Amino acid sequence: MSWNLKGSYVETCSCELMCPCNLSFDHGATHDFCRATLVFAIRNGEIEGTDVRGRTVAAIIDTPKVMTDGNWRLGMFVDDQATDEQFDKLVQVFGGQLGGPMAALAPLVGEVLGAERAPIEVRDDGLRHSVRIGEVIDFEVEDIVPFGVETGEPVRFSGMFHPAGSDLTMAEARRSRINAFGIEYEGKTGLSTSEFTWAA
């Protein structure tokens, strides 16, 4: 069992700006739940000999207020250009069955809601990142540049525990329509990175 993935990442979640869950999974969410859509656009990668470059995967989760309480609900989308072999391998990686970052989260998942193919479009335009998944998910987040920062560099969190990596850019939702696998919410905050790297 060996695999590696590299690409870009964007998410939006239901918490108010500065999601407490990103500071630590054992901090309670803004509401009585945390709902998030995590989108991975894979530039390069292979899973047990299967080339998966150019594929995109999205996970949508519904968790309790305190994420470490477990009993998460998880649904997955793989872009509709994936072959059957690519689809199966990606679902195994993102479901945590083949090790890596998602395997660390797998014990928290109480219910897998399914995995489906769908057209997935990810656009990066400077500080703005947008995602459209079929007719069920459409959101855009914008990286936050603090007042007075003349370089235009956005705010970054460093040292996080997060499946996409430990150094991510803070973002704010500009638009949000999310209703998939029975999980519906308004995205308010977000994260992005131009580079995630996974291997197992």
Image (cartoon, rainbow, N blue to C red):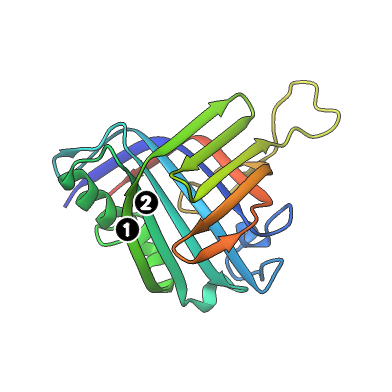
Mark 2 nearby-residue class (10 Å; few <14, some 14–19, many ≥20): many
Q: Where residue 155 sits: x, y (%)? A: 70, 38
Around disc 1, counting alpha carbons within 10 Å, would you say few (fewer than 14), some (14 to 19), or many (20 or more)? Answer: some
Q: Residue at x 20, y 52 (%)?
A: 88
Determine the residue located farthest toward the top in the rendered image: 151
Residue at mark 2 to residue at mark 1: CA–CA distance: 6 Å
Counting labels gives 2
Q: Residue furthest right?
A: 148
Pick the front one: 99 or 58? 58
Q: Is residue 98 above or below residue 199?
A: below
Q: Which quarter of the picture shows residue 23?
A: bottom right
Mark identifier at residue 115: 1
Tag 2 and tag 1, C-beta contact below 8 Å:
yes
**Front residue of this view, candidates 79 and 125:** 79
Indicate left or right for 23 with 152 as reference.
left
* Residue under numbered circle 2: 77
